[in-house]
Image (cartoon, rainbow, N blue to C red):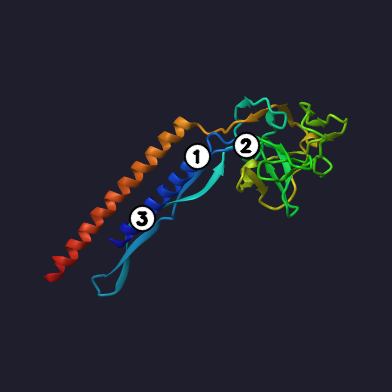
Amino acid sequence: MFRGFYTVASGMLAQQRRTEMLTNNMSNSNTPGFKADQSAMRAFPEMLLERVEKDHLGFPQNKTVGPINTGVYMQEAIPKFIQGDLRDTGKKTDMALYDVSMPVDGETGTPGSVFFTVRQADGSLRYTRNGNFTLDGKGFLTTASGEYVLSSQGNPIQLSSDQFTVSENGVVTGQAGETSQLAIAFAANPNQMIREGNGLFRTGDGKELPDAAATGGVRFSLKQGSVEQSNVDVSRTMTDMMTAYRAFEANQKVMQAYDRSMEKAANEIGRL
């Protein structure tokens, strides 16, 4: 009976976590460059039940009852790095990356992806697909949350004004003639990237991603005056949220049935 409680509770927790993930996807459906999370549901290892009873000579022996499943859990939420649609904004500080042709990881079959390289205040590198950039008071190109957008030399990009151009291969040319090459990084297996807040990602091992332009087989394009939209499928996400909610309700009803059975066992059978 208690095992049933644990199994049902694990199902409710798994569906609650999945609902929270889907809700986060839905709330970021209009966030530029956002990559929707997808859940990985796993079952706990099954246990083999046995009972001990005496044979005809009175010696104890084990007899197999059968396997029992101990529940399910949501192992992790993995970002889905599918190209989002490009939306024209007309703002010169907006930039969108487009994956033209990416090498496919031999082990996972997952195509790679490219990212803008940015630097946080503590000097650590982060990567993003959100090209909704701006110029700060000193003319540095930054993300909306204040990280410096880096050049291929690893330096912040400073411009004399917001009247600059960006070529398809990432060359930034300012009004005063200053030029910089945007640092575009390549992740061979983007599923290993770890999501942080504000549309930022970091590598799992802390190592720096290689330069996309110097990696064979990588072809990308950059469009100024546009942003990459979120790749969240709103209608599919709504359907998945309803499915998760109904699964949660079904587990809840089973738990209520267990509760009534235990109450009856305690109040009625216990008096015998």
Amino acid carrying mark 1 in the image: Ser
Mark sitting earlier along the chain (3/1): 3
| Quadrant containing the N terminus in the rendered view | bottom left
Q: CA distance from mark 2 to mark 3?
A: 34 Å
Residue at 69%, 41% in the rendered image: 143
Q: Do callouts 2 and 3 mark residues in contact (Cβ within 8 Å)?
A: no
Mark sitting earlier along the chain (2/3): 3
Q: Which residue is mark 3?
A: 9
Q: CA distance from mark 3 to mark 1?
A: 27 Å
Q: Which residue is mark 2?
A: 110
Relative image position of residue 108 (x, y in whole percent):
61, 40
Q: Farthest residue toward the front? A: 137
Residue at 43%, 44% in the rendered image: 19
Residue at 33%, 60% in the rendered image: 3
Mark 2 residue crowding within 10 angstroms, few (<14) / some (14–19) / many (20+)? some
Q: Which residue is mark 1?
A: 27
